Image (cartoon, rainbow, N blue to C red):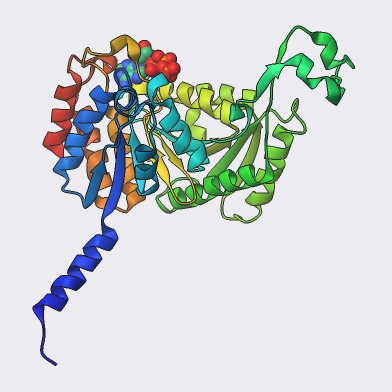
Amino acid sequence: MRFRPSILKETLKGILMATRKRVVVIEGDDAAPEAVRPTLELLDRLNLNIDWLTPPIGDQAKEGYGSTFPEQARRAIDESDATFFGAASGKSTAALFYLRFGKQTYANVRPVKWLPGFKSPLADPKGLDLVIIRENLEDLYLGVEGEIQELDSLNLTSPFTGEKITDMVPGRYALKVITEKGTARVTRFAFELARKRKEQGRPGKVTCATKHNMLFRSDGFFREVAQKIAGSFPDIVFESLIVDDFAHRLAANPQQFDVAVMPNLYGDILSDMAGGLIGGLGLAPSGCYGENYAYFEPVHGTAPDIAGKHIINPTATILSAAMMLDYLGFKTEAERMERAVQKVYAEGRTLPRDQGGSATTEEFAAAVKDFL
Ligand code: ATP
């Protein structure tokens, strides 16, 4: 048989297309785009096999399409492998809700790792390397709230005081929902991550934090399901703590934790606090993972108070991008990004304002670029 170069070319093209990824970029609001843009330049430098999509979202979309999250944007997300998100205030919230609830990204993964050069308030932050996994779709964040009167037909009483709930008017309620499916998938995710980290030398431990001593039925159920999942991971140590005890230990000795999993509200609050332990929100990345989709954004919000000043620390955004590369299979490039950030902090010459330096966002990103 004669060799035909065109067959080889077609095969190579096929392989390339199969590994080519599509990523939606949403710059977000207020100061967020100031961190996203230099991060995109770093990604560009890596010559990745990625198509970047920028569908209309937010204020611009409202002007052109009459909605902050038009159909084109939803379709672009559906056709992509992941989304890279700055941070949302009001204008990009519809897109964020779609990424979360529409794409069922149930595990919000928030690594908290101290690197030499991070301005931690702790006397000895060495060895601080934990991951908080926040259940992302349930708990009090279903957004079901209302007037107490609406509960009239349920005839509810407090198990502690015997008081009829509807006698407590005027007042409001919020619904906390913990399901078996939601809890099982997020705790399984935590165990699988602990297993992967164990292979890299971490202790292989999952801590479940709940308020099961007060909320017997809801948080108690989260704990019960987590305990059941633990049975399938005999190689991983499982511990269950009351969430206030977890908070105390997190402040006093965070090095004792490896992977911690908890319901939505506790995870939201405690991961911000954990970010404070390594040196602030500017350093804390995150990724939200579902069965078939993930999006990546810094833990911090849109930092509206420093918008336009070009002093937002882009580290959290850059490290979120590294998490995304890892998810998409660009492991070498993810490590390169992380290592470059590590080197800039270890060197300590070009640090952002929140880390005690005087570099602008762009100057810091340029320093990272030099090490890429
Ligand atoms: P949101 O409601 O979206 O969380 P927020 O203003 O309440 O917004 P953040 O945006 O997280 O919360 O900001 C909290 C504080 O931390 C602000 O003073 C902000 O300037 C600061 N901050 C947040 N992220 C960074 C960052 N990457 N670099 C420097 N400062 C930051």
Instruction: Name the image quarter holding residue 299.
Output: top left
Q: Nearer the viewer, residue 23 or 282?
A: 23
Residue 327: x, y in percent? 36, 49
- Residue 101 higher or lower than 283, as above or below: below
Q: Is residue 151 visible?
A: yes
Looking at the image, residue 273 sits to the left or right of residue 347; the answer is right
Query: What residue lies at 42% left-to-right and 24% top-to-bottom?
Result: 275
Query: What residue lies at 54% left-to-right and 44% top-to-bottom?
Result: 205
- Check the picture and name the quadrant holding the N terminus: bottom left
Residue 368: x, y in percent? 17, 33
Residue 197: x, y in percent? 44, 48
Q: Nearer the viewer, residue 12 or 270?
A: 12
Query: What residue lies at 33% left-to-right and 51% top-to-bottom?
Result: 328
- Check the picture and name the quadrant holding the C terminus: top left
Q: Residue furthest top?
A: 170
Q: Residue furthest bottom?
A: 1
Instruction: Name the image quarter holding residue 10.
Output: bottom left
- Residue 249 higher or lower than 84, as above or below: above
Looking at the image, residue 336 sits to the left or right of residue 124; the answer is left
Question: Which corner quadrant of the figure contains ligand 1?
Answer: top left
Residue 291: x, y in percent? 49, 51
Q: Nearer the viewer, residue 350 or 94?
A: 94
Q: Residue furthest right?
A: 162
- Residue 293 higher or lower than 358, as above or below: below
